[in-house]
Image (cartoon, rainbow, N blue to C red):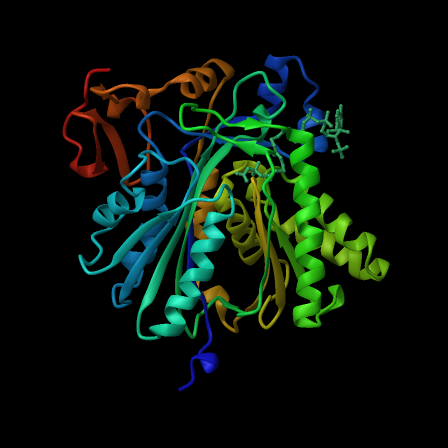
Amino acid sequence: MSLNSITVGIDRISFSTSQYYIDLRTLAENVGTCAQKYYQGLRQQKMSVTPPNEDIVTLAANAAQTIVATEPNKHIGILLLGTESSIDQSKSAGVYVHRLLGLSKYCRVVELKQACYSGTAGLLMACDFVRQNPDQSALVIATDIARYERNTPAEPTQGSGAVAMLVSANPKILEIAGTTSAYVDDVMDFWRPNYRREPLVDGKYSTNVYLDALQKCWERFKQLSELSLNDYYSLLFHVPFCKMAHKALNKLAENESVDEKKFSAFQNKIEQAIQYNTIVGNCYTASLYLSLLSLLENAEESLAKKRIGLFSYGSGCTAEFFTGVVQEGYHQYLYRDMHQKHLSERIELNYEQYVKMHDHHVNAKDNAFVPTGDYSVGSFAFVGINSHQRHYQAVDEVEYAYAG
Ligand code: HMG
């Protein structure tokens, strides 16, 4: 069999976020802004807030555990973890996740970084890995905590979450095409020096750079693929805040001939694709894939055989446009009920609780422990730092609470 004849792509996809959120009406009231600015101006309603015993490792393990548990026979040959909320300058967060998930000792693990783009780097590398090793699967996890300084314009665009994707030959959910178009430009729109907890961001400039990168990727992709806007059923974009997806669609439509009916169909699909993002917020590397999941799990009609365009953007910047075709029978392989239960059971925070969680900084020092009983988590908890080593446990193994 030639490598080109193998179809590869997303075989399973699962998501996890924090157990806590703040309604942006609460934030607006307390920072003296009109709630409509967030609800309409940014199209954001809620954002996930992470407690001290949750980090990118626990989010990632929580997102991936269902896939690993329901697909025990898949031979996972590589784990690629994309993040920009790294917890260590050297050791990959993926190695902790690998242990928590009980993966084979013969599975490679690496962490990837390029702002919000690195989940896409992981996904496309995973597709190449499976093309070369069709009897193996790759586990890709995009996991992040989007945290900005309080009382800044970026504050309502925080959030957190992880999306895990199993990439296999003959995928059950989304076949990913080999042709893609990437674009890179050395710009300072958003960055986080190693000595800072929160990023620096030139917000308005970042939205312009994003749109410019989209246009560049799109023009090149058209040349490479000969596909036009009309060949797509829906277009998905990196979603730092939900209005951005509409801005991106408007940008593409500026220079393309697309009739009103088709344009309004694209807008309608975006609405389905931001249902989860609007109540979770930005989760950097995971945002595009949360949007894909939202479309798959909330679409009003079957997506089988439909072509989807995906635009990934990571500040700094690297961007890529690529496409996928949804597979027949895909809906049987989704964990829709589990995701919707998880989202609906989150706990709402008042403003003071949000401030306390936002400002808690356990990573700043050694011998900092998290009182595990104080906060609700998924199946895995971060229990603290001791001798400069991070400790994680499956929740039912946590037998004691460290003193704070
Ligand atoms: P801002 O100061 O809130 O902007 O910052 P604004 O005053 O222009 O208001 C935003 C929108 O609300 C505008 O709509 C206003 O008209 C509207 P627009 O013109 O954009 O359509 N508005 C109202 N609407 C209804 N009722 C009202 C009202 N008042 C105003 N009363 C900004 C917004 C996004 C810049 C800020 O939140 C920010 O800096 N966010 C972080 C950066 C970001 O998300 N950038 C996006 C592109 S870069 C990216 O995606 C990469 C990233 O994910 C990181 C990575 O790659 O690692 C961030």
Q: How many marks?
A: 0
Can I make out residue 233 in this image? Answer: no
Q: Quadrant of ligand 1?
A: top right
* 271 lies left or right of 116: right
Instruction: Give coordinates of residue 153: x percent, y percent.
Output: 63, 22
Between 246 and 19, the one lying in front of the other is: 246
Instruction: Give coordinates of residue 152: x percent, y percent.
Output: 60, 19
Outermost residue toward the bottom in this view:
1
Q: Residue at x 43, y 24 (%)?
A: 197
Outermost residue toward the front in this view:
186
Instruction: Give coordinates of residue 106: x percent, y percent.
Output: 19, 60
* 253 lies left or right of 54: right
Looking at the picture, does residue 216 appear above or below residue 279?
below
Q: State which quadrant residue 68 falls in.
A: bottom left
Looking at the picture, does residue 243 appear above or below residue 235?
above
* 384 lies left or right of 37: left
Q: Residue at x 48, y 66 (%)?
A: 173
Quadrant location of the C terminus?
Answer: top left
Q: State which quadrant residue 161 falls in.
A: top left
Instruction: Give coordinates of residue 257: x percent, y percent.
Output: 84, 62
Q: Residue at x 34, y 25 (%)?
A: 52
Can I make out residue 368 in this image? Answer: yes
Q: Residue at x 20, y 26 (%)?
A: 388
Quadrant location of the N terminus?
Answer: bottom left
